[in-house]
Image (cartoon, rainbow, N blue to C red):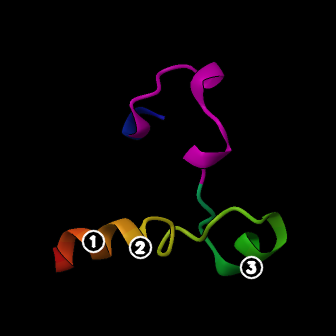
Amino acid sequence: MAGARKFSIEYLDRNDLVSLTKEAAEVTGIPYVMEADMEEAQKILLG
């Protein structure tokens, strides 16, 4: 939570969550941690 700068559970929403395994991502629909911000990272790296 602190990494998301949200210091109370009431401020979290589904967009703040990531799955730690691909299997969990498939079951829950929550993005896999290694793919969660891939588009944003590509924009930064490629300009």
* Residue at image mark 3: 23
Q: Which label belongs to residue 43?
A: 1
Q: CA distance from mark 3 to mark 1?
A: 27 Å
| Residue 43 at x, y percent in the picture | 27, 71
Q: Quadrant of residue 45?
A: bottom left
Q: Earlier in the sequence, mark 2 or mark 3?
A: 3
5 vs 34, left or right, is left
Mark 1 residue crowding within 10 angstroms, few (<14) / some (14–19) / many (20+) = few
Q: What x and y, as percent, mark residue 16? A: 56, 45
Q: Tag 1: residue type?
A: Lys
The magenta segment: 4-17
**Kind of residue at badge 3:** Glu
Q: Position of residue 44 (x, y in %)?
A: 21, 68
**Which marked residue is nearer to the observer: mark 1 or mark 2?**
1
Q: Which residue is mark 2?
A: 38
Q: Quadrant of residue 42?
A: bottom left
Give the crowd class for mark 3: few <14, some 14-19, many >=20 residues within 10 Å.
few
